Amino acid sequence: MTPTDRRSFLRTSLGGATALALASELDLAAALFRANAPVSVALVGCGRQGREMLAELAKMENVTVVAVCDTVESRLSSGQRRVRDAKGYATVKELLAGEPGVDAILVATPTHTHREVAEAALAAGKHVYCESPLASTIDDAKAIVRAARASGKVFQTGMLGRVNPIYKLAHKFWKTGSIRNAVALRAQSHDKTSWRVGSDPALNWRLDPSVSLGLIGELGTQQLDVYHWFLEAYPTSVSGRGAIMLHDDGREVHDTVAATFGFESGLTLQYSASIANSFESTYELIEGSMGTMKLAWSWGWLFKEADAATQGWEVYANRQQFHNDEGITLIADATKLAAQDKLKDGVGLPYPPIYYGLESFLKSVTEGAEVQCSAEEGLRAAAVAIVAKRAIDSGDQLTIEPGLFEV
Amino acid sequence: MILTLARAAMATRFELVLDGDDERFLRAVGEAALDEVTLWEGRLTRYRRDSLVAHLERHGHARAIELDDETFELFDVCDDVRIASGGAFDVAHRSGGGLSVDRAERSVRLERPGVELDLGAIGKGFAIDRAIAVLREEGIERALLHGGTSTVLALGSPPGEEGWGVRVLAGGGARTIRLDGRALSVSAQHGRRADAAEGHLRDPRRGRPAADLGPIAVRAPNATAADAWSTALVVDPGAEQAARSMGIELFALDRGEPSESAT
C-alpha cells in the first residue's frame, strides 16, 4: 500500500467495526438543535451560569426565551440585555403568574434556593432543568425528587458529563474496555479567583458557610458525577481536608480542599479543588491498566499503555504531546472530518458543554427523549458532595450510606 | 490603595489597575471585569470550535443570525468602521469580505459558505469596553485596563493628576499620551517584530500586506473604536479624515510629534 492508499483505507475503515465508537452519534455534535415544535422557556437566576445558558439558547431554532427572573435588579437587567423581548420578573411566583403558557423553567439560582424554585415550577406544571448541585441539603434534594416524580414532567439535573459528546465518546471507549480496568481515579478543579461577587451579600452565597457546599459541592459535584456514570457506582467512604491557603480575608469557606473517595471495588478517587491556584484547570482522569482517559469538558484525550493493542484508526488519529505522554484527541464528528481530511478541525467541542445540557433537556421536552440526568441522579451526586463537605469540615472519614439516596 | 489584577486571555496578558479603599470589594469587581474579558475571548476567538464566531461561520450563510444587544453592538461597530475606512478594516478580510449586518433585525449573515471571521483587530478593545462597563456599574471611578499593552482604557484620573499618562515607546523614543475615560490603541505593520520581512496586517482590498507607514497610536472614546481604527489606519492612512470625523485622534509615533506632557 502506498501512504495515500493506506490513508484512504484507514479513512474507509473508520466506518467499520473497529471505529464504532468514533462513528457514534457524535457526528451530530455540531448540528444545530431545532426543536420539532416551538418551545418556550424562562430562566430563573441571571448570574454567570444563567447568562451562559441564554447565549446557548439563542443559537437554537424554535426555542424562545419568553422571560427571565432574578431577585437582584442588576442581574435581572443584565439577563434581559442578553435576550430580545424577554419579560423580566423579580420572583418565581410572579414569573409563573405572568407566564402561564411557558413550557419549561431553567433554574440557575444559588444552590440553596433550587428547591423553592423547582417545587414552584413543577407545581405549576412546568418542565424543569435545574443546575447542579441539585440542592445544598439532602432534605431539599429529596424534596425535589419527590416533586419531580409527582409532577410527571421532565426534570433534568444539569450535570454535564452525561450529555457531553466528548464524554459520551469516552464512555463508549470505556465500556468497550479500551483502557481495560480502572486502577486509579484523579480529578481536580483549579481556578484562581476570590469567589467574591461585588458587594451585595446575596450574591456572595458561595462564601456563606450557612448555605454553601464549598468547593467540593459547587465545583466537585459535576466532576464526581462523571465517575458515578462511568463506574455505575457511588463512593462508599470519604475523607478530606480543607484550608484557607490564599484568600485570608475574613472568609470561613475553604479556598483549597482535597478529598479521597473510596469505592467498594477498591478503587480510590483523589480530588483536589482550589481557588488559590489555576494550574491545569479542570479535568477528570480515569487511569486504567491499558491506558488513561483525560477528560477536560471541551476536550478529551486517550493515553495508551505501550502494551495496549493498537486499533487501525489510531494511526490516523490526531495526537497531542503532554510532556512525556502522547494523547490521542477524542474528537466529535470524527468520521465526517476524517473523510474530509480535516480531523484537526474537530479538536474541542463544537458548543460549550451547557449547550448539550439544554439541548438534551429540550429534546426530552419536545420529542419525549429519555432524560439524560434525572432528579435521582442529581440527589445521589449532591448527597456524595454533602457528605464530602462534612468530612472535609470535620477531618473525619465518613461513610456514604446508601440510605441517603433513597426517597 | 492600588490593586493590580491580571488575566491571560486572547493570547496575551490583560492587566487591570484599580484604585479604592476596600481591597475585598476591588478584587471582587476586578475579577468580574476580567471575567468579561474571558467570556468575550470564548465568544470571539477563531481558535475554538465552541465560540460564537465558529457558530456564525458554520451557520451564518444558511440563515440570518439574531444577536443579543451587546454582541450586535460589536458587529455594528465592525460594519461602521468597515464602511468609514473604505474597507481597510473588515472582519471578513480573510475571505475577501462577505459579512452583512442588518440593523433593523439586529442580525448578521454571511453572504456565502466559507466566509471566515477574524475579530482579532477589534476583540481586545471590545472586551476591554465590556470589562470597564462592569467596573462602572459597580461604581468604580478610577481604573486602567490594558490588553497586552496594545490597547488600553483608563477611567477617571489618579489622585492629583489630569488623566492617566500612558507612555508609548516607538522609534527609539518615548512619548506620553493622556487618557481620562478614553482609550488608546497602538498598531504597526510589523507589530513587535520590526525585523520581519513582511508585516502582519493585510489590506483586505488587495489581499496583501499593507504599506508600512510606521507605528501609530489612536485615541478614541472607547477601546473598541481605538482597537479597530488603529488597524484600519495602519492598513490605509488615507482613512484618517474619516477617522477624525468619528472622534478618532491619530498619533504617528515616528513623526516626532510632541508628547502631551513630559514623562
Image (cartoon, coloured by chain):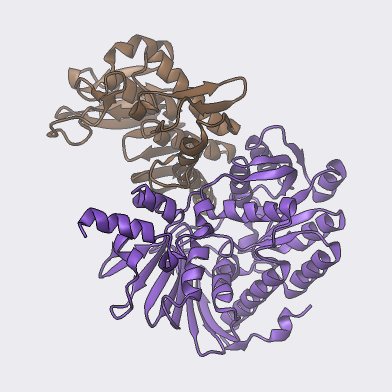
A187, above or below A37, in the image: below
Q: Residue B209: give x, y in percent of width and height.
A: 22, 25
Q: Nearer the viewer, residue B225 or B55?
A: B55
Instruction: State which quarter of the image contains the C terminus of chain B.
Output: top left
- In the displayed structure, does residue A323 sit left or right of residue A45? left
Residue at 83% x, 56% y: name it: A120
Q: Residue A157: give x, y in percent of width and height.
A: 68, 63
In the rendered image, what is the letter of the chain coloured brown?
B
Q: Residue A356 falls in which quadrant of the image?
A: bottom right
Q: Nearer the viewer, residue B190 or A6?
A: A6
Q: Residue A269: give x, y in percent of width and height.
A: 49, 80
Q: Nearer the viewer, residue A333 or A8?
A: A8
Residue A202 in view: no
Residue at 83% x, 42% y: name it: A99
- In the displayed structure, does residue B137 sit left or right of residue B236? right
**Most extreme residue toward the front, as rendered?**
A1
Q: Residue A277: give x, y in percent of width and height.
A: 41, 64
Residue at 72% x, 79% y: name it: A405
Q: Nearer the viewer, residue B79 or A193?
A: B79
Q: How many marks?
A: 0
Residue B154 in view: yes
Q: Residue A376 falls in which quadrant of the image?
A: bottom right
Chain A image colour: purple
Residue at 41% x, 43% y: name it: B17
